Structures are given as C-alpha cells and as structure tokens.
Image: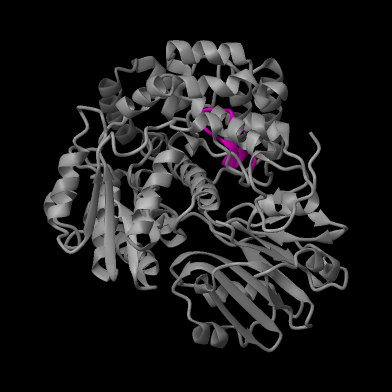
Amino acid sequence: MDDWWVMLPDAPAAAAVAERLRGEGVRRVPHASGRPWLVGRWDARQEVAARAGEARIVILGRSTAQAGTLRRRIERVRLPAEAERAVTGLAGSFHVLASVGGRVWARGTASAVCRVFTPHIDAVPVAAGRADVLAALSGADPGLGELAVRLLHPPVASTVLADRTFWHNVRAVPAHEALVWERNGRRGPNVRRWRPPEPHLSLTEAAAEVRTALTDAVGTCTAGGGTVSADLSGGLDSTSLCFLAAREAGRLVTVHWEGRDPDNDDAAWAARAREALPSATHLVLTGEESPDWFAGVGGLRLPSEEPCAWVRDFAKQSDLLRRVTEHGSRLHLSGGGGDEMFTPFPCHLQDLAATRPWRAWRLLSRERHQWRAGHQSVARAVLGRTSYRRWLLDAAGHLTLAPPSGFTGMLGWRSEPRAPGWATPEAVAMMTDALRAAAADSPEPLAPQRSVHCALQQVREGGNTIRVLNQTLAGPDMALPYADDAVVTAALSVRPLEAVRPGTYKPLLGAALAGLVPAHLLARPDKGPYDADFYHGLRRHHGELLAPTEDSLLAEAGLIDTERLRRALRHHAAELEPLLHTLGCEVWLRSLDGGGPAPVPYPPARRAR
C-alpha cells in the first residue's frame, strides 16, 4: 500500500518542503491562509473533510463521519483541541487532522493502528502518518538502540519506545496523545486525548457497550458496499466478526486455512459457522494449498516504517489477500485483538489483592493448583507490588536470566522481557540502557491496573503490526475491528472478575453477541493450537532460515551472534520464540539496503551505511 500524507505548519518556510513532495497523483489541502497543510496520496473513499471559517478538519480512515455533520460541529471551533469534539462518538479507526486559524491538531488511535510521527526538515516541523515517509524525506538512518529493543521477547517496544521510532530524529506522538502546533509551527505541549476506562461495569452493562461498539466498528468496514472478506479460523473472535459483517455486507467472502495440529479443532468449528452463513462465499485451504509459515523468508524484502515479526507468515497472508482480491474483496477483516480484549490477564488478581485480599487469595490458590505453582512463589509475586518504574529497572537487570516461569511470571506489569540467546553483549547493553532510560522519566503505566496495562500494550503491539502489514502487503487493506478505540474502551470497562467465569470462554464477548451469533458457536470453550504449524515451517524452511545468518546485517551492526543463532535453529531449541523478532529486524534492515522499492512515491534521500 502506498498511501501516505505529510502535514505542514502554516508558515512560509513550509512551501519549500511541499515542493519536494510534488508528483503525479499527489493531493494538496491548504490551510485557511492558502499555504500548504496536507500533501500526499490517499484513497478519497477514506476521507471525510469539512471547513467552516478558519477551521479545517480531515478524517482519514474508516469512520462513520459525514461531511455535513462535521461542518456543523466545527462552526464554533476556535482552538485546535476543540476539533476533537467534532469527532466525539464516531466509530472506526482513523486519523483526525485539524487546522484552526493556522494552529494544528493531529492524532491517531489509542491502539496504534493509526500513528502520527514528526521530525524537523530544514528547520521546518513536519508530521506524517508513516515514519518511513519522513525518514525518506529527511535522509534519516535506522537507530541501532531501538532495533536492539525490538529483539526482546515478549515485545515491549510499544511502551519502552513510546515516543521513539526506528529512525534517528523521527519521533512518535504517543498513541494516546495529540500533536499540537501553534501558528508558524511552534510546537505546543502534546495533549492527552484518550484515557483507558476504569474497569467498573458489570458483565451485563459492559456487554451492551461492547455490542454497540463492535457492531458499529464492523459497520464502518461494510458501509462502502461491495465485497468484504474476513478470516474464519473457527475461533470465537473471527467467527463473531463474520456474522456481524454478513448482516450488512453486500457480499462476504470468508477464508479458513486448516492447521496441522491434530489437537486443533478449529476446522470443525469453522465448518459449523459456514453452515450458518449460507449466503457467504467460503474459501477453505488445506495445509498444502496455502504457504507454510516461514516460506520465502530467506529472500524477503519488506520496506516499511519498522520491523514486523509477522514476516513468519508473510507468504501465507499474501496468498490469502491474493485469493480474496480475485473474489472482489475491497477490505479484509481480521480477529486480531480479541484475545487481549476478552481474556483478562492473570495479573488482574494482583490488582484485586490490593482491595479484596481474601477474595484474591482464594482465586490465586485455584490458579496456583492449575499451574502447579508453589505457594511461596505465588505469595511473593502477589505481595511484591512494585511500581511500573521499578518493574522497568528490574527488567533491565534481568535480561539475560532464564525466562520468568509459568503463572508467577504473569503477575507483574507483564512478563519480564528477555534478550534472545544470540544477542551480543553490546545489544544487551543497548536494551538495558533503553529500559533504564524509560524508567528514568518516572513513566506512568498505560493504565493504573496491571491487567489493563497488559491488554493495552498487547493491543498496541498488534496495532503496530497491522499498520506495517498494510504498508507492505498487496491487495485490500486489513482491518482490526477489535482494536478500534471504542471497542477497546467498551471491553476494558468490565470488572475483570465478571469477565472470568470458570468453564466459560470469553463470557463478555459471548454476552455481547447473544442473538447475533448462533448460541452453539458462542459456546465454544477454547481456541485451537498452532504449534505444529510453527515447527513444520521451521523444519521445511530450515535452509531459508539459515540463509540470512550467512551475511546478517544484524550481525554486521553488532547486535547478534550468528553462530549462536544457527545453533539454536539447528536444535529447534526452546528459546526459538524470540526468533520472530530477530527475523523481522533482519528482513527490515535488508529491505533498506537497496533490496526493495522506495517506501514513498518519490526518490528517498541516500542513506549512509
């Protein structure tokens, strides 16, 4: 996908930057002064714009916005922050860009599906929805310290690097904030425009909120008419989206690829869903009809704004989008984000311990027995209520230790990250510095509750992933309705104790969609495993996985030891979980090394090696 936009201040010096962006198909939207404000190339069907007096507002993305309503709402807008009121109540996933008398407001989504980035170019502040566009425009080089952080598992880049990108001098606006420019481009303080909800609603109350938000989110996907497609894995998340989409879509195409794990019953549940969706077109792919995980990874080149761990199944996703394109799909829905929104993290018991210790201890005892965790280790984990800052500092000192074990490892602000076994001492030092630097600012967690913080971090990692995939995959865009801000807010509003019911899988989602999805499908008690697909791909494409280690750019940068990585690959060691992040970083560096097309539709500045 080559959609992009660049935002400029209402200042004379911005004209020179705008001239550098001229090209075929490039659109220009001016400030009220007539100076260039937005320059770029984007799908007009994804734009809703309005103007009134000196106020201009542009919404880019999926939304329920209507130009006439927007125009009426901005008639009294006099300050940039007031433009946010004009989009209150809108469903979807979109950027909000406003110019009010030459002052500017720009924001993306709390899920990080839409982001805002900004550097200075020739002393002019510039912003864009893609960091690689700004890197190409400014000639920025990749940042090795940020790449080192991306090697950690589980990933923490979305929080530790909250306002940093993988490019020198290109900064990110934190996902919950808005960028503000005064006249002439002088930057004002960022404004926090989104806060996570307090988990205070009963299951019934939260279900009503989720039902409305999720229905509206899927409605923004189907509103354009025509054909849309959706994953139908057989899991509760994707199945639910298919039934919601089928209610409104002109035509629905579903895709199911069969896993290799004999314990995975997704195929049976997907078949039941297909029977209940007779009007949809269903594509069912066997393991031999769809590319394996890791297929083609040895020669993969994916120019994008940041590394993506999903290089693992880039071939599979490309094949999927090719097939739905042949059936006329203009947008593909994915169930990503559903697990994070509807399966409370174990650390919600840590939150509960602060207010209702006896109730928490009874629940912890039950979990302890299920996980076979020791009584004393669970007690230490619960009583050790460290601050988020302390957690970052502890994590910085534990990077080379064995991974935290089982249940107790999940009771913190999240499972502590670990450096992969093939990370060099220099890379570990960079990781340590990044974690300590994040702690030095006395950061607030994403939410006061550990369980909500964990959910939001996972959602943002997924938002970053889908944004990068949409920049690199050919075919229709992929949409993540579960990551829409309104859905996230609704799902996180439930009291965690009510969203966890023994013997019931994702009770909040089931209650929200009762009557919209057949009851026998909502009764599914679990999800299918995909370990067999992972290891089959490792075995079958072992040579391709070894190929990048022969002339690794990560090794050249001093971040990994290729011999240790080859040793892990040869023995299929248990430490291979971090492999996906390492592969993503290696592919990304190779893509910047002259191996792929320019990420923006004009010649990028030459980058130094």
- Queried whether the magenta region covers residue 146, the answer comes back as no
Q: Position of 114 compared to 344: left or right?
A: right
Q: Residue at (35%, 43%) from the top-left corner?
A: 339
Task: Mark yes or no: residue 200 visible.
Answer: no
Q: Quadrant of the N terminus?
A: bottom right
Name the residue nearer the viewer: 474 or 84. 474
- Residue 487 appears in view: yes
Q: How is the image coloured?
A: one colour
In this rendering, the answer to whether 352 lies above or below 393 is: below
Residue 514 position within the rendered picture, expressed as x and y whole percent measured from the top left: 18, 59
Q: In the depicted view, which residue is nearer to us: 476 or 360?
A: 476
What is the number of callouts on the image?
A: 0
User: Residue 605, image x and y in percent?
Assistant: 79, 49
Going by the image, does 298 lie left or right of 121? left
- Of the 4 image quadrants, the one containing the C terminus is top right
Q: Residue at x 67, y 67 (%)?
A: 40
Left or right: 381 as drawn, with respect to 16: left
Where is residue 404 drawn, in percent x and y?
46, 20
Q: Which residues are magenta?
A: 150-161
Q: Quadrant of residue 400?
A: top right
Looking at the image, residue 529 sits to the left or right of residue 401; the answer is: left
Q: Residue at the location (38% across, 58% down)? A: 325
Say above or below: 420 vs 235: above
Q: Quadrant of residue 109?
A: bottom right
Q: Nearer the viewer, residue 360 or 148?
A: 148
How far across and how far down the image is residue 512, in percent? 25, 58
